[in-house]
């Protein structure tokens, strides 16, 4: 029995052969005209049906005339249309021989499904042998941008070839770039494609030639080469990284990344990932057997910033590298095991492999592992951490104490109708290479009485804090000779507030204005704590949040004595139409009724009287303007302790201007100005000027120009920034060519601009400064090319 005529497999020819070059959905195509390389077919219905159900759906064939002969040759002529599910094929003439399964489609061959449209001059094949040929075709992807053509497509079974194929995301009238390949072989069973003699042209100029390139044509993971990264920098020279992907199993894989830097040598990087029902993990690292950078710049490693020799300093040449491990495992019942480990080979590593201000600020790497649990009214954990020095300008005496181990518990429970009881508990064993060892237990049981109504709340709270230590001989001698000191004291507080609101109108808009007064009273008796060690306790920076805390220190080694009252007031204006908060203003101050006698070395005691006024204001006068201000004024000394302003203005759909100023007495004074200004739809300029006023030193400056069309973008960025811990500046010039839907060539610029210019991509519009790297974070992006 002869096979009946099936719909020609044109979708497989293109949709499976070129997806490696298809455009990402995240690209910006707003500049593209409404123009298709293959316009929609007037006689084709809207695509319908499900792709997965095609094989089970019948094929309907219609035409103006049907001729059948005794030789089993069937000819459809005039407006021939074949339909199956979401697929449509139209042609002027279709001839099919049922005796041998061959067919020929001539004249205006048109194909459409939910993902693409194709026009071709001729198609023929043998259904029995499962061979097909399509000649002189053009295609247009529908779900993803992309269009092109091919001289011929040959298919046999699950494999085939495209001869003389092209691809671009540009419209035909603006062919800024195009990928051309003499031949692309694909195998749908293996899910792979191989392009031979591929050339990328910008206009008529070839900019990239690839003699052989393998790429995936489906979503299956498979072992093979990933796209290489080629860059050029003053420190590394010519830099080539070639990732090699290893598909080891459905739930774990690996990537090896050999790297060659002409000025430094060879480096090998690797990453191993796994995923299972109970958790996941990732192990990564880099190793460089010999790095010539230290030999090229020995003074950076053997001398201090003043040119004096550093005793015992050596050149970090051999076996440089870094290591990371992140993993978690669910233990059930709200418990999990988690580990975050990091390591670097030497204290210069972060500086030599980082190109950001925030990477340089990491002075220690903290590795943590533990078991953690959380429930409705409790959380607990048993963990350990270890700190490694990562800054050559410091010594190991500056490291924080290792906690080997640390156990903690936070628990609360309602008691009857009126009360709540709970406890905060912690037990830690501290260890330090320089300052020896000690243990600490800190217990803070409490009882509170939370009372509240629709517009008020009152919460009296009484806690008792007990802290005890067990110190080795060295620590005991350094803290008065007592090896088992302790501290015990009560903590009483009262937190009360009210909420008022009213309707107000400004022009045509109606607002709800709130008035939120708040009182917070704290009473803690004095205890002499000079004999207690200080493992992890430091004064916190005075801010709005500190007005309502029962301790101004970060850890339990010091507990303030207090007899103080905080008075605060907040008002808000909320637009009734859209719920947008147009204004939020808060003002607060602490009244100290007694001197606070508990201090740490280098800290000034808090005297009786009033604290600095703390003011926070957020204003959004329009949808485009946002202004945040913070201010602290000390009436006792008639001086400002802090002044900060951050403002943002949005320009059109893409532009943004940011201006920031921050001053904190005796610490820092900085100004930061950044912008993305669109000159027109295609041209824009970018810039940043980040300056330390107190040090009279530039931290970072950026100036650049961008050109963007429908399918292509070019960025030219000049940058000067602090590159080394001694404050030395470095200059760089970056050029990037981005072919949308294909990739980019040159040094990456978007990562730097997104960090430096808040709102550069208009995805993050929160008016906050770029986040710095925390002390206990270790980021694997350290191998970014300067």
Image (tube, rainbow, N blue to C red):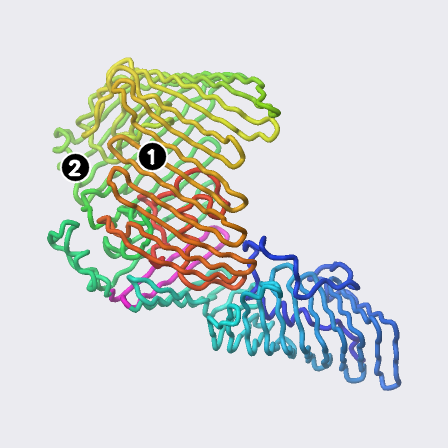
Q: Is residue 706 visible?
A: yes
Where residue 615 sits: x, y (%)?
38, 24
Residue at coordinates 38% horizontally, 29% vertically from top-left? Answer: 630
Using residue 197 as the reference point, say whether residue 689 is left or right of it. left
**Which type of secondary structure does the marked residue at label 2 adopt?**
loop
| Highlighted range, magenta | 263-291
Q: Is residue 417 visible?
A: no
Label 1 crowd (10 A; few <14 / some 14-19 / many >=20): some
Would you say the magenta stretch is mainly helix, strand or loop? strand
Using residue 613 as the reference point, say whether residue 430 is left or right of it. left
State which quarter of the image contains the N terminus: bottom right
Residue at coordinates 61% horizontally, 77% vertically from top-left? Answer: 160
**Which type of secondary structure does the marked residue at label 1 adopt?**
strand
N-terminal label among 1 and 2:
2
Outermost residue, front side:
679
Label placed on residue 472: 2
Q: Is residue 632 magenta?
A: no
Name which quarter of the figure residue 658 lies in.
top left
Up/down of 715 relative to 760, above or below: below
Using residue 523 as the reference point, say whether residue 292 is left or right of it. left
Nearest to the observer: residue 26 or residue 597: 26
Q: Are the residues tagged 1 and 2 within 8 Å (C-beta)?
A: no
Label 1 to label 2: alpha-carbon separation:
43 Å
Label placed on residue 662: 1
């Amino acid at each position: 029995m002869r096979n009946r005529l099936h719909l020609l497999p044109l979708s497989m020819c293109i949709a499976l052969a070129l997806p490696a070059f298809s455009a990402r959905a995240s690209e910006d195509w707003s500049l593209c005209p409404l123009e298709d390389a293959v316009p929609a077919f007037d006689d084709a219905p809207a695509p319908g049906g499900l792709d997965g159900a095609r094989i089970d759906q019948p094929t309907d064939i219609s035409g103006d005339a049907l001729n059948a002969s005794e030789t089993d040759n069937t000819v459809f002529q005039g407006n021939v249309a074949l339909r199956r599910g979401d697929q449509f094929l139209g042609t002027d003439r279709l001839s099919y021989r049922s005796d041998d399964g061959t067919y020929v489609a001539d004249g205006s061959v048109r194909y459409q499904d939910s993902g693409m449209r194709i026009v071709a001059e001729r198609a023929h094949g043998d259904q029995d042998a499962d061979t097909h040929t399509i000649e002189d075709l053009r295609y247009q992807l529908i779900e993803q941008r992309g269009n092109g053509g091919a001289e011929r497509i040959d298919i046999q079974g699950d494999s085939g070839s495209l001869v003389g194929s092209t691809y671009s995301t540009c419209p035909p009238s603006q062919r800024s770039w195009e990928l051309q390949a003499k031949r692309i072989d694909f195998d749908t069973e293996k899910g792979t494609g191989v392009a031979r003699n591929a050339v990328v042209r910008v206009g008529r100029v070839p900019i990239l030639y690839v003699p052989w390139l393998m790429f995936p044509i489906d979503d299956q993971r498979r072992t093979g080469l990933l796209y290489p990264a080629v860059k050029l920098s003053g420190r590394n020279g010519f830099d080539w990284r070639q990732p090699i992907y290893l598909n080891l199993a459905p739930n774990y894989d690996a990537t090896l990344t050999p790297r060659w830097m002409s000025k430094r040598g060879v480096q090998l990087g690797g990453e191993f990932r796994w995923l299972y029902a109970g958790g996941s993990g990732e192990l990564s690292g880099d190793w460089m057997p010999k790095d010539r950078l230290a030999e090229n710049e020995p003074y950076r490693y053997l001398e201090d910033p003043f040119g004096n020799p550093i005793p015992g300093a050596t050149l970090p040449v051999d076996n440089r590298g870094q290591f990371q491990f992140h993993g978690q495992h669910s233990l059930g019942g709200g418990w999990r095991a988690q580990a975050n480990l990091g390591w670097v080979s030497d204290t210069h590593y972060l500086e030599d492999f980082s190109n950001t201000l925030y990477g340089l600020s990491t002075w220690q790497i903290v590795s943590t592992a533990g078991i953690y649990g959380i429930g409705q009214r409790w959380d607990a954990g048993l963990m350990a951490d270890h700190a490694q020095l990562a800054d050559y300008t410091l010594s190991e005496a500056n490291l924080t104490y290792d906690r080997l181990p640390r156990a903690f518990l936070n628990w609360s429970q309602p008691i009857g109708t009126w009360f709540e009881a709970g406890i905060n508990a912690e037990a830690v064993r501290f260890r330090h290479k320089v300052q020896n060892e000690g243990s600490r237990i800190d217990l803070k049981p409490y009882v509170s009485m939370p009372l509240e109504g629709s517009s008020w709340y009152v919460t009296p709270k009484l806690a008792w804090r007990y802290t005890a230590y067990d110190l080795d001989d060295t620590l005991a001698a350094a803290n008065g000779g007592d090896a088992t000191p302790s501290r015990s004291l009560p903590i009483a507080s009262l937190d009360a507030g009210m909420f008022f609101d009213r309707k107000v109108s400004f022009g045509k808009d109606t607002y709800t204005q709130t008035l939120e007064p708040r009182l917070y009273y704290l009473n803690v008796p004095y205890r002499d704590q000079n004999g207690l060690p200080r493992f992890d306790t430091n004064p916190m920076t005075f801010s709005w949040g500190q007005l309502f805390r029962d301790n101004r220190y970060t850890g339990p080694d010091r507990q303030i004595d207090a007899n103080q009252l905080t008075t605060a007031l907040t008002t808000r204006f909320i637009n009734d139409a859209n719920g947008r908060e147009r204004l939020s203003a808060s003002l607060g101050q602490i009244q100290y009724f007694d001197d606070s006698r508990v201090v740490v070395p280098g800290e000034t005691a808090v005297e009786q009287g009033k604290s600095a006024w703390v003011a926070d204001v957020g204003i959004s006068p329009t949808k485009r303007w946002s202004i945040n201000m913070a201010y602290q004024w000390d009436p006792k000394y008639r001086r400002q302790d802090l002044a900060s302003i951050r403002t943002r203005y949005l320009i059109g759909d893409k532009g943004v201007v940011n201006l920031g100023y921050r001053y904190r007495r005796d610490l820092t004074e900085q100004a930061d100005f950044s912008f993305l200004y669109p000159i027109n739809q295609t041209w824009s300029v970018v810039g940043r000027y980040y300056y330390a006023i107190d040090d009279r030193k530039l931290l970072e400056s950026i100036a650049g120009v961008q050109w963007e069309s429908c399918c292509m973008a070019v960025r030219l960025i000049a940058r000067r920034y602090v590159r080394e811990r001694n404050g030395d500046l470095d200059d760089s010039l970056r050029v990037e060519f981005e072919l949308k839907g294909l990739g980019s060539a040159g040094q990456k610029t978007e990562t730097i601009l997104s960090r430096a210019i808040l709102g550069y991509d208009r995805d993050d519009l929160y008016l906050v400064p770029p986040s710095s790297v925390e002390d206990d974070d270790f980021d694997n992006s350290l191998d970014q090319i300067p």
